[in-house]
Image (cartoon, helix red, strand yellow):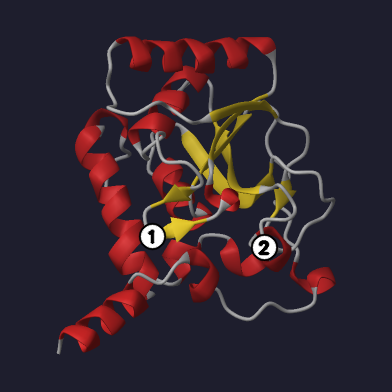
Amino acid sequence: MKTMYIFLSLIILNNCQLSAPVPQDRTTEVWAPTTIQKDKSKAYFASGCFWCVESVYESIKGVEEAFSGYAGGKTKNPTYYQVVTGRTGHAETVEVIYDPKLVNFSTLVEAFFDSHDPTLLNQQGPDRGTHYRSIAFYQNNEEKEIIEKYIAKLEKEKVYNRKIVTEVKPLAKFYYAENYHQDYEKNNPNDLYILNVSVPRLNKFKATSPELIKDQQH
């Protein structure tokens, strides 16, 4: 019975990689967003499986949309199955489209740290690998300073018992992930990974940061 329980647990705690459907040819699968309004800003974060991260940011007031993709590595136009090998250097990353009149970059950085464990190296939840590492990307010196100051604040206050391992990196290039990864939680509500990992992570964030959450969020 114990062996069967362990087996079922492994199935339920299926990670991003194993839950993903079989990919089609990259040329028909790559995804690109519609035109983003000029009055909106973008921010980029990596903190584990992008299915989870996407849903976290889409729950925040002032965030218009979040898109899954890859960043932080050197391989051009990577596919999902290249990224999960760990050889591209990329991490699963989310592009956050937000209204700076409603939410600022500092708040998004706080949400980043509040919604995952930044002391875990190359892992988050049941997911393991360098493509699941924690990265806060910046696009200018102001954003870099905001991130570094917030990390210093967390360390000074000893919020965590372990050292923060989040990378602070300039955004060189963001590559959008394949179609089936976009809005994965919304489109696959009965997926075992979504039910057992993504939704609990989202609900935990909502409980710790209720003031940031949009009205009528599930």
In the image shown, does 154 or 130 lie closer to the viewer? Answer: 130
Q: Name the residue under label 1.
A: 126
The correct choice, above or below, for 171 with respect to 92 in the image is above
* Residue 180 locus on image (x, y percent): 60, 69
* Residue 87 locus on image (x, y percent): 73, 55
Side (left or right) of 200 relative to 53:
left
**Which amino acid, by three-letter code, is at mark 1?**
Pro
Q: Which residue lies furthest to the left in this view?
A: 1
- Give residue 162's quadrant in the image: top left
**Which amino acid, by three-letter code, is at mark 2?**
Thr
Among the two numbered marks 1 and 2 on one chain, the one whose residue lies closer to the N terminus: 2
Count numbered badges in the picture: 2
* Residue 20 locus on image (x, y percent): 55, 73
Q: What element carries label 1?
A: loop
> At 54% from the left edge and 68% from the top edge, which residue is drawn?
17
Query: Dividing the image into 4 quarters, which one contains the C terminus?
Result: bottom left
Side (left or right) of 143 relative to 87:
left
Q: Can residue 120 be seen in this view?
A: yes
Q: Is mark 2 on a helix, strand or loop?
A: loop
* Residue 192 locus on image (x, y percent): 35, 74
> At 59% from the left edge and 45% from the top edge, which residue is drawn?
93
Q: How dense is the environment of label 1, judged by Cα within 10 Å: few (below 14), some, or many (20 and up)? A: some
What separation in Å lies between label 1 and label 2 (alpha carbons)?
Answer: 17 Å
Side (left or right) of 108 relative to 169:
left
Q: Mark 2 points at which residue?
A: 85
In the image shown, does 175 or 42 lie closer to the viewer? Answer: 175
- Give residue 36's quadrant in the image: top right
Side (left or right) of 9 relative to 115:
left
> At 54% from the left edge and 46% from the top edge, which residue is drawn?
66
